[in-house]
Structure formats: structure tokens, C-alpha cells
Amino acid sequence: MPELPEVEVVRAGLAPAVNGATVTGVEVFDARSLKRHISLIEQQSGEIAQGHGRTLDAATQQLRAADFEKRLTGVTLGPAVRRGKFLWIHIEGSSSVLFGHLAMSGQLLLRGIDAPDDKNVRIRIWLNHPVHGELRIDFADQRRFGSLAIDELVATDDSHPGGLGTELPLIPQQAGHIARDPLDPAFQQDAAVRGLRQKSLPIKMALLDQRILSGVGNIYADEALWAARIHPELPANQVSAKRLNELLTAVQFVFQKALAEGGTSFDAQYVNVNGEAGYFAHSLNAYGRSGKPCNRCGETLKRSEVIDRSSVFCPVCQAKRRRRG
């Protein structure tokens, strides 16, 4: 699943192409990719269909597709914004945004209008930008877990900007429950440490709780825990505040390093808006390296299951014991 660095690479690539662009057309090829989009008819009636894309009935899928196409066509887009793994594009002159979640395999690909079709395109958005001319965005998603939607903005809880890319203290309703990420200027590390210390579950799982801090998934959790020398199965409430601060500093470090290298790409699903792969995979110290020597001490890295999540760690550097201090 794309994590903060991969989604930020996408946001940064989209930003200059969408800000100020007019949407000249929208084509929904697969309405299952609108699972998070609620049509105006559903909103007004209060009868919102339940389901997750694959289980929505054909009539609801058709209703949402038509609504999405109609409401987005003709609008002018504004800044591209990200918080954690979520991104959105402001719709100028309204309180609405184009909200996106890439999930497991979603891609937002920026293309010229005559470019060949991308594989697994579910939604296509045609743009006309005053500087860059005619463009298109292909939302491709092999597994169909990702989604696009038109969502409404609400005020942030702390009155700070909603995310990276905006100064407005607004956030889409669907991302309102997501905590700030460690690279957000308004991120409160002390509050995140307190949140982690209240959890009795393994620190690896606490680190993945997007209500405490956002943007972290399996890849960067493993990398940060390795850097901080903390065993992934150690209960979060047994890790000292000092060690948790070191862990969050490690999260910030691996995020920044991954961003500098364009994110982590293992296959064609992890790409930027131009379809290019990042190369942070060559810098990984833990994730995906089970059975290989630790880059720090030479011990063989091990793999374990932490509440159905695979973790790779060094049994020497990350010994499972409570560290003092």
C-alpha cells in the first residue's frame, strides 16, 4: 500500500498541473472506484447505499457515476493537498474537494491527451490548464480498493491548515478522523507519544493507528523500528517516552529519505504521476529483507506476524525487552 512518501510524490507531481486547471470532461469506466462518493440524490434523501464498491448494486453505481461526472465537469481546480496517505484537490469557489485514496494499488497518472491508455484505468479526468494546456489524469487501480469522491470540507480540530499544500484550516469530512503526520508542521509529537503510551498492543500496530499519527504503513514502520532498535512486538505502553520520541524521529528520518529517493517501488503499482518508480527500496534495512544479514550487526533478520501484519526485525539490535530511559 502506498504510504506517506509515495502519496506525497503523487501530490507534488499533480500540484502544478491541477492548480488553476478547468475540468473539461470526466469518464467513469468503473463505478466501483466511487465507493466513497455519495451522490447528491443520496445526500438529499438520506438513503445512502451501503457497500464497498464491489457490493453496491448496479443502479447505485450508475447513479454515483453520473453524479460524479456532472458535478466535476466544468469546475476549476485549486491546490493539491495531502495528510498522511490521503490527498485531495480543492474545487475553486466551493466548499468541495476531489478526494482520493490510493489504497493498495491506486495510481493517479498525469498524461498528455493523446497518450496511450494506461492499464486498469477506472476513471479519467480531462483538464485544460492555462499554462500547461490540455492534460488528462488517469485513475488506475488494479485491485479496485482505491477510490475517488467529491467530498465536503469541514474545519480542522486545531485550526491549523488541513494538510501539506494549503493554508486553509479545512479538511475533507472523510479524512477528519485522521491524525496529522510526522512531516506536518502542525504535528504535535508529545501528543503522539502520549497516544502511543496509552496502547497495550504491540508497538508495530500502535504505530499503524492513523488516529494517533498518519502516513505510516508496514514499510516505514519496520524501517523506523529498526532504526530506533525497538522490537515490533513490544507493547507500546512498555516503551518509555524517550524511546518513543526516538522512534518518531526515526519515522521522520525514513520519510524524508524516502521522499528524496522518490518513494518505495517494488513493482509497477508504486509509481509517480509520470509512471516512474522510486528507488528507496534499495535503501531498506528491514522491510522485505527477512533471512538477510542486518546492515548494522550482521545477524540474520527474522520475520514475525504481529496481529496479522508481517514484520521484519533484527533479533539482536531489536531484542524484545523493555529499554530504560
Image (tube, grey):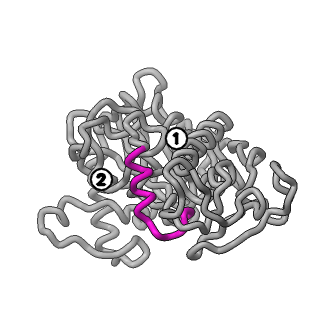
Which element is circle 1 on?
helix
Which element is circle 2 on?
loop
| Count of labels in the image | 2
Give the farthest residue toward the top: 131
Q: Nearer the viewer, mark 1 or mark 2?
A: 2
Identified by mark 1, the residue type is: Glu
Q: Nearer the viewer, residue 51 or 197?
A: 197
Magenta stretch contains residue 195: yes
Q: Nearer the viewer, residue 312 or 201?
A: 201
Mark 2, residue position: 176
The answer to whether residue 3 shows anywhere in this view is yes
Magenta highlight: main SS: helix
Q: Residue at x 24, y 38 (%)?
A: 159
Mark 1, residue position: 8
User: In the image, residue 108 lies at what x, y percent?
Assistant: 52, 47
Q: Quadrant of the N terminus?
A: bottom right
Label 2 environment density (alpha carbons within 10 Å; few <14, some 14–19, many ≥20): some
